[in-house]
Image: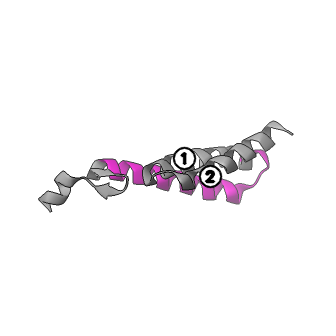
């Protein structure tokens, strides 16, 4: 098994594990998996996979930042913000 195979299997494991965590955890784990998939795809010259995973990583990180900015916890507005609305 090559180091690239290991990267691919770790990325796969992270992606699968992301389905067993909270929404915030899901985005963090999927971002991490996407980074590993980018490395894997670059090593095998699979540029469409690189592009797809760059998009996934950026969207995940932006959504985490948006939730933090809006005061959301696990994708839900905190009670203080709900009372203001």
Q: Quadrant of the N terminus?
A: top right
At mark 1, the secondary structure is helix
Q: Residue at x 34, y 52 (%)?
A: 67
The residue indicated by pointer 2 is 15
Quarter of the figure that contains the C terminus = bottom left
Q: Answer with left or right where residue 13 lies relative to residue 58.
A: right
Please, which residue is most extreme toward the right here?
Answer: 1
CA–CA distance between discs 1 and 2?
Answer: 7 Å
Q: Nearer the viewer, residue 62 or 74?
A: 74
Q: Position of residue 69 (x, y in %)?
A: 29, 49
Residue drawn at (80%, 36%), measured in percent from left and top? 3
Queried whether the magenta region covers residue 34, the answer comes back as no
Q: What SS does tag 2 mark? A: helix
- Between discs 1 and 2, the one toward the N terminus: 2
Q: Position of residue 71 (x, y in %)?
A: 27, 50
Question: What residue is at 63 percent from the left and 53 percent from the top?
Answer: 16
Is residue 38 in view from this perspective? no
The residue singled out by tag 1 in the image is: 29
Q: Quadrant of residue 2?
A: top right
- The residue furthest left is 84
For label 2, the crowd category at 10 Å Cα-Cα, with few meaning under 14, some 14 to 19 and many 20 or more, is: many
Q: Are marks 1 and 2 in contact (CB under 8 Å)?
A: yes
Give the left or right position of residue 53, taking residue 46 as reference.
Answer: left
Residue 41, horizontal then vertical, whole percent: 73, 50
Check residue 55 for magenta coloring. Answer: yes
As drawn, 20 above or below 6: below
| Magenta stretch bounds | 42-68
Chief SS of the magenta region:
helix
């Amino acid at each position: 098994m090559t180091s690239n195979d290991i990267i691919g299997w770790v990325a796969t494991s992270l992606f699968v594990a992301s389905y067993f965590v909270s929404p915030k955890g899901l985005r963090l784990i999927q971002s991490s998996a996407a980074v590993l998939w980018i490395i894997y795809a670059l090593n095998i010259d699979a540029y469409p996979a690189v592009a797809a995973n760059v998009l996934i990583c950026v969207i995940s990180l932006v959504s985490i930042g948006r939730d933090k900015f809006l005061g959301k916890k696990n994708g839900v507005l905190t009670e203080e913000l709900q009372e203001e609305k």
